[in-house]
Image (cartoon, rainbow, N blue to C red):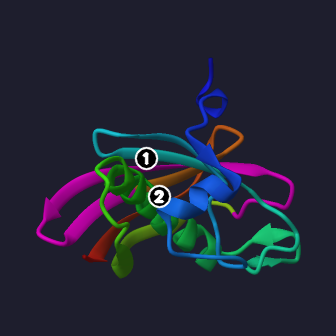
Amino acid sequence: MGIYDNVIADGETILQFIPQRAPMVMVEKLHKAENGQTISSFKILESNIFCKEGFLQEPGLIENIAQTAAVGVGFEYRNENKNVPTGYIGAVQKLTIHKLPEKGKTILTEVNVEHKVFNTTLINGKITCDNQLIADCKMKIFLDE
């Protein structure tokens, strides 16, 4: 059984874990959210706001990593019957874009929490497509609780 087979939330359900709404939603399915690790997937559509000339552009990849982190936090908060906080990207470090994913492809994004101090979380994010690493970075996220 692959990670794609396990779906915790998708469609309208995933929207309860993130503050974004169309056309800014950059996560489609939540596959895992436990022990500081979140895994999501997202199919690249030509109609996507960040899709240009058939490829998802760099801002879309950064937003996808941030929203994957957000959906993991939102899932955790909902399970604890708490209101889902809004998160803000504080910094993006060591961003490497190896390749832009093309329309019609599905990307798999993994976020791992490295440190948490008060309302600040440092994460490592990576995106793969067809089992190939296409982007990775460290990101500092601030939660407005």
> Which residue occupies the foreground of this view, 11 or 38?
11
User: Nearer the observer, disc 2 or disc 1?
Assistant: 2
Which residue sits at x=28%, y=50%?
Answer: 80
Identify the magenta region: 100-124
Q: Is residue 8 above or below residue 101?
A: above
Mark 1 is on which residue type? Thr
Residue closest to the far left: 117
Is 42 left or right of 32, judged from the image as shown?
right
Circles 2 and 1, Cβ within 8 Å, touching? The answer is yes
Magenta part, dominant SS: strand
Q: Quadrant of residue 6?
A: top right
Look at mark 1 in the image and give the residue it sits on. Answer: 38
Residue 108 visible? The answer is: no
Which residue sits at x=86%, y=54%?
Answer: 104
Q: Is residue 34 above or below residue 104?
A: above
Residue closest to the far front: 81
The image position of residue 4, as x and y in percent, is 65, 33
Magenta span contains residue 115: yes
Look at mark 2 in the image and give the residue it sits on. Answer: 71
